[in-house]
Amino acid sequence: MIVSSWTIACLLALPVLVRAAPVTRNVLEKVHDSRQGAVIYELGEISYLANALYPKAVLNGTTIQSSPDFSPIAVIVANETTITGSYLESTIASYLAGDDVFSNDFLASLYLTSAVGKATIDRSGVDYLRSLELESLYLDSSVFGCKQLSNTKTYAVAGVSAENLPAGPYTAVTQDGALSLLSTYRLYRDEYRTFITGAYPTGNGEDSFTPLGYMDPRWWNPMIPVPSRIHYWNDSRPLAGVRVAIKDLFDMNGMQTSAGSQAWIRVTPIANSTAPAIQRLVDLGAALVGKYKLAQFASGANPWDWVDEQYPFNPRGDGYLTCSASSSGGGCSVAAYEWLDNAIGSDTGSSMRRPAAGLINLEGALPLSWSQDTAGVFGRDPLQWVKFAKAWYTPELHQEPNITGLTPLVVPDNNKFPKRIRYLTDYLPLANPAAEEILQDVLGKMTALFNMTVENMNLTSTVIGANIYPEKPANVSNWVYPRSRGNSYDQYTSVVRPLKTAWAALSGGRFPPVDPQWRSFVRMNDTQLDREEYNAGLRLKNQTVSWFEKEMLYETEDSCSESMFICDIGTGGLPSFREEDLNQGRNASFLAVRPPYAAITCANICPSFACADYTIPLGQVEYQSPVTFFPEKYPVTINMIVRRGCDFVLFNMIEKMAKAGILTTVKTGREAF
Ligand SMILES: *[C@@H]1O[C@H](CO)[C@@H](O)[C@H](O)[C@H]1NC(C)=O
Ligand SMILES: *[C@@H]1O[C@H](CO)[C@@H](O)[C@H](O)[C@H]1NC(C)=O
Ligand SMILES: *[C@@H]1O[C@H](CO)[C@@H](O)[C@H](O)[C@H]1NC(C)=O
Ligand SMILES: *[C@@H]1O[C@H](CO)[C@@H](O)[C@H](O)[C@H]1NC(C)=O
Ligand SMILES: *[C@@H]1O[C@H](CO)[C@@H](O)[C@H](O)[C@H]1NC(C)=O
Ligand SMILES: *[C@@H]1O[C@H](CO)[C@@H](O)[C@H](O)[C@H]1NC(C)=O
Ligand SMILES: *[C@@H]1O[C@H](CO)[C@@H](O)[C@H](O)[C@H]1NC(C)=O
Ligand SMILES: *[C@@H]1O[C@H](CO)[C@@H](O)[C@H](O)[C@H]1NC(C)=O
Ligand SMILES: *[C@@H]1O[C@H](CO)[C@@H](O)[C@H](O)[C@H]1NC(C)=O
Ligand SMILES: *[C@@H]1O[C@H](CO)[C@@H](O)[C@H](O)[C@H]1NC(C)=O
Ligand SMILES: *[C@@H]1O[C@H](CO)[C@@H](O)[C@H](O)[C@H]1NC(C)=O
């Protein structure tokens, strides 16, 4: 270090300006120091986590002395060669406005560097820095010649390039001769109890995650760590900084996969790799913030049948509404939290809804049915949701035809929209007339925007009357029965058999405790398996889908999918509750109700026919709550279904509808609109 050059041209001699009121900040109060090196502290009312085990950066500075204290610190990466007061002021203002992690409390200390090489701080900049009353100012010695600021401890430090240290809030800790900057996360309380655990990147360079073993003891809520948005402002990856929750069915390296079962946890090691579909999110820049609750092994269990876990709470309406089926923690978390952007879920027979069969690799996820499982994303903003889905679904991760039993997927991205809407009379109109009114309004706007027509169709009678299998009458059992046998084959061989075998070895031959809908499965044995029947089921599925894509949703010169189906996997605009008894009567509904004359539920159309099915929120209706005894609001959704592989064309339609104001971003909290 060339100490002699430090004092020149440093405006040391400037008189200290007369200032307004002294700066007040919350001081750090340490709450918890975990064995994994996670330091949890509070600044005022807000909790933070700092990763002390693997610092984000270590900067050398000869005069730095050791201190046991952790301290909040802001990092600014300048892009000007002359740093003025107004530049610093507007930079900090943009941090405060654009990020929920950063706060004025982080201006306790400041590290200033530059992405454009040598820079100087002009007089207005010096005045501004003084006005901050910093505890310490750290200046990158490769950038600044000026090394001292009167009345402020100033250190010249070296050791990290601007691109390896994104701007924003950090936690500082000092040792003799070094400043460590720790990755810092704001901790949010999961007040609707939608998560199993929060998680953050371990930071050891191995793409692994550390579960956050910390909860709010007053409210029994898991705490969820979210990174600063500022860190990603210069990151051009499509999902940079997008905060995502993951269904606890997918492996994340370093974390236990529970599948919603205590027994499964006991017999399964901590995952040592991340499922490819989830790793892709990481590669695209997404910030995975934790794993959320699911119905055990992704079954479609009702809320009152969740035994191992407590069913998550829904922020909408009276707070006692269902979150729907297996991906419920994800749906309700996205509905609840502004600090969360998206959640990844999966769908087999009805959950979050699904892309076309085969669109994304499901290795590293527990299967319900290898041939029918799909994965999708929940979001609030239709444009952001489309961008997310298009970035995520990539041909590299399409499934092999030997998994789906179908030809390889082709997924065009064009505007060859459907010409007709087929309004499925098996499932429509919606049971609640106020909800149907909303649907009709949207259909009217869609037909105008896309020059489409609406036609009624009874899918059940169409299928029954069709000649799907040349050698057999096309009765419902033909296309539903083998499929459900296929499901139980996969569930048994991939989940139940390994679970009960390992459990028996641990417990003197006992069967594992599982939620009610799995009890008969754990009693199953290999003699009940029929691989031939399973293969026959796959062949039948292929025939079913071939027929469907020839006669129902088919491709033409002008349309990826000549028509689109409209139907409802929900509850017809009637509320459905987490408490069984509240669903009795005409003013409420159970989930997954099959109309008596329909062969299958709407939710089973695409699992049977491999098509793409997305649930789109349209509006809300009022209901009289049997919980709050107040009028509350219930969201109305509809399902849009297109031919297998037309997912991106449907996304383009949704984007166009959003731009035309037909679809809007849903709000978080009690009311969606
Ligand atoms: C983005 O990069 C520019 C330099 O190109 C830098 O000045 C700016 O501070 C960076 N922003 C963030 C948030 O890192
Ligand atoms: C520095 O960044 C700001 C805000 O991002 C931008 O408006 C400005 O043009 C940048 N200046 C240079 C020299 O790149
Ligand atoms: C920082 O200091 C350590 C120990 O003194 C040294 O090994 C390291 O090379 C230094 N790093 C830089 C970037 O100066
Ligand atoms: C990862 O875990 C699997 C399954 O438990 C195991 O077979 C494999 O050896 C592990 N790999 C490594 C690198 O530890
Ligand atoms: C499917 O085919 C791929 C090669 O294309 C092979 O690696 C994989 O093991 C096959 N999977 C099954 C379930 O047969
Ligand atoms: C059904 O299988 C045949 C033979 O493998 C294949 O040519 C056909 O495309 C498949 N049908 C569908 C809908 O994928
Ligand atoms: C709308 O569609 C009809 C066919 O259904 C077609 O005859 C007409 O030209 C289309 N109008 C526009 C403006 O594209
Ligand atoms: C649809 O078709 C089924 C089977 O033919 C019939 O039972 C049912 O009444 C029809 N539903 C409607 C709404 O037309
Ligand atoms: C429907 O198909 C199943 C399975 O192939 C068969 O057992 C049943 O007899 C058929 N029912 C009718 C009404 O054709
Ligand atoms: C397998 O299940 C069948 C039907 O429940 C039962 O009859 C049989 O005894 C079981 N076999 C074994 C080995 O448990
Ligand atoms: C349904 O709600 C209406 C309006 O709130 C009420 O008048 C009616 O009694 C309710 N019916 C039942 C079966 O709860």
Image: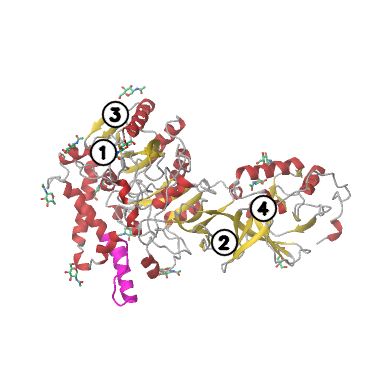
Going by the picture, which residue comes out furthest to the front?
A: 629
Amino acid under disc 1: Tyr
Q: CA distance from mark 4 to mark 2?
A: 18 Å
Q: In terms of sequence position, does the residue under pointer 2 or pointer 1 come before the other?
A: 2
Q: Residues within 10 Å of mark 3 (few under 14, many from 20)?
A: some
Circle on res. 162: 4
Amino acid under disc 4: Ala
On the rendered structure, is 532 left or right of 358? left
Magenta-colored stretch includes residue 309:
no
On the rendered structure, is 11 left or right of 509? right
Q: Residues within 10 Å of mark 1 (few under 14, many from 20)?
A: many
> Residue at left 68%, top 45%?
92
Q: Which residue is mark 3?
A: 454
Amino acid under disc 2: Gly
Q: Residues within 10 Å of mark 4 (few under 14, many from 20)?
A: some
Q: Is mark 4 within 8 Å of ligand 1?
A: yes
